[in-house]
Image (cartoon, rainbow, N blue to C red):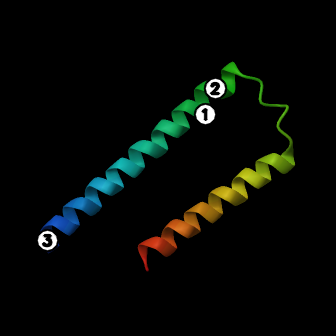
Amino acid sequence: MTVTPVLKLTLQWIGNGLAIIGIFFVILRLYRDWHVHDLSYISLNIWLAITCLAIFYCFDSFLLVFS
């Protein structure tokens, strides 16, 4: 099956839309849970580790896109 330029563009727009919806979903869930649960037990080191892992995951995804 060959991928036409129109199909490729359509799939890219669908993928971008799903990614944006996913980001907003995570933001809404974090905002809701932030007020319900006490997250003060998570230390700064853990937050930094989560941030580093998220950045690494983002970089890894870019490598997959451009490979």
CA separation in Å, label 3 and label 1: 41 Å
The local secondary structure at tag 3 comes to loop
Q: Quadrant of the N terminus?
A: bottom left
The local secondary structure at tag 1 comes to helix
Report crowding for label 1: few under 14, some 14 to 19, many 20 or more residues within 10 A (C-alpha): few
> In the current view of this chain or complex, which residue is farthest to the top?
36
Rendering coords of residue 22 (x, y %): 44, 44
Image quarter of residue 7? bottom left
Mark 3 or mark 1, which is nearer to you? 3
Determine which residue is flagged by label 1: 30
Seen in the picture, residue 40 relative to 44 is either above or below; the reply is above
Seen in the picture, residue 29 relative to 63 is either above or below; the reply is above
Determine which residue is flagged by label 3: 1
**Which residue is rendered at x = 46% and y = 40% of the image?**
24
Determine which residue is flagged by label 2: 33
Rendering coords of residue 25 (x, y %): 47, 37
Contact between labelled residues 1 and 2, with CB atoms less than 8 Å apart: yes
Report crowding for label 3: few under 14, some 14 to 19, many 20 or more residues within 10 A (C-alpha): few
Rendering coords of residue 65 (x, y %): 42, 72
> In the current view of this chain or complex, which residue is farthest to the bottom?
67
Q: Is residue 25 left or right of residue 60?
A: left
Mark 2 or mark 3, which is nearer to you? 3
The local secondary structure at tag 2 comes to helix
**Which residue is rendered at x = 78% and y = 53% of the image?**
48
**Which residue is rendered at x = 21% and y = 68% of the image?**
8
Q: Is residue 62 left or right of residue 48?
A: left
CA separation in Å, label 2 and label 1: 5 Å
Rendering coords of residue 59 (x, y %): 57, 69
Precedes in sequence: disc 3 or disc 1: 3
Q: Quadrant of the C terminus?
A: bottom left
Precedes in sequence: disc 2 or disc 3: 3
Kind of residue indicated by mark 3: Met
